[in-house]
Image: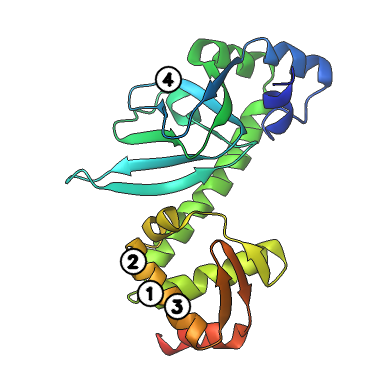
């Protein structure tokens, strides 16, 4: 791992001068984690920064079922709320693949906020973006039909990446959880959309062939 990879990747820190980034980097502890390894659990008080790989963040329902909240990609981080005193009693972080992470403990992070007050404003900005993601998931789950959720998600990704051919950001299992369904049902819905020539899919590679067709699914559900 390069010396400054964590700090330089994170929007929370990379706007600072390189000299300040080096100071912050000395507080970050670097760690390699393997696929399936637990990265943080309820009760942990540390800022976890993803340097490479993807980390899923999930919570457990009352019946013990895993509910995906989000996938944190390189440059993302998790755990800032606990550093401000919030209690985490149900959220976990797990490596989706072999990863590199950095983490900063609560005491060191609070010292950083005192020394660099501009970080507080940056935190508010990034947390607002996180809230939008959670609102998006809530919007999906409010849709009655799985095909409507899937069509909406696929069109949303198209808008983000700016092309009709892209690799799905989530694995099928994670996407199924995100959309509130099962992998089997999700696979069946994909096949239905393919049979109607709305899209073409090869594993995680998706190409939207008929945008209006997908839009009609959403409008017909209204």
Q: Which mark is residue 45?
A: 4
Instruction: Work out how far the residue at label 1 is from the one at label 3, CA to CA, in angstroms.
Output: 5 Å
- Nearest to viewer (mark 4 / mark 1): 1
| Inter-mark Cα distance, 1 to 2 | 6 Å
34 up-or-down from 197: above or below: above
Tell me residue 157's x, y (percent).
60, 64
Q: Residues within 10 Å of mark 2 (few under 14, many from 20)?
A: few
Mark 2 lies on residue: 184
Tell me residue 56's x, y (percent). Answer: 46, 41
Q: Which mark is residue 191?
A: 3
Task: Give the image quarter of residue 16.
Answer: top right
x then y, percent, for residue 10:
67, 32
Q: Position of residue 178 (x, y in %)?
A: 41, 57
> Of marks 2 and 4, which one's residue comes earlier in the chain?
4
Q: Secondary structure at mark 2?
A: helix
Question: Mark 2 and mark 1 in contact (Cβ < 8 Å)?
Answer: yes
Q: Disc 1 designates what residue? A: 188
Q: CA distance from mark 2 to mark 4?
A: 37 Å
């Amino acid at each position: 791992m390069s010396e400054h990879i964590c700090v330089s990747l994170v929007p929370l820190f990379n706007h600072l001068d390189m000299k300040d980034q080096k100071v912050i980097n000395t507080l970050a502890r670097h760690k390699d984690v393997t696929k399936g390894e637990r990265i943080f659990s309820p009760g942990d008080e540390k800022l976890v920064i993803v340097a490479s790989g993807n980390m899923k963040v999930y919570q457990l329902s009352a019946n013990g079922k895993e509910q995906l909240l989000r996938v944190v990609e390189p440059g993302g981080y998790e755990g800032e709320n606990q550093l401000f005193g919030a209690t985490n009693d149900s959220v976990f972080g797990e490596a989706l693949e072999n990863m590199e992470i950095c983490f900063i403990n609560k005491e060191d992070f609070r010292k950083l906020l005192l020394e660099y007050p501009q970080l507080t404003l940056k935190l508010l900005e990034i947390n607002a973006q996180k809230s939008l993601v959670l609102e998006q998931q809530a919007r999906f789950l409010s849709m009655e039909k799985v095909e409507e959720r899937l069509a909406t998600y696929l069109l949303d990704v198209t808008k983000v990446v700016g092309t009709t051919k892209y690799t799905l950001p989530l694995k099928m299992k994670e996407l199924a959880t995100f959309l509130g369904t099962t992998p089997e049902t999700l696979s069946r819905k994909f096949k239905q959309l393919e049979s109607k020539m709305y899209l073409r899919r090869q594993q995680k590679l998706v190409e939207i062939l008929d945008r209006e067709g997908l839009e009609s699914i959403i409008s017909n559900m209204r």
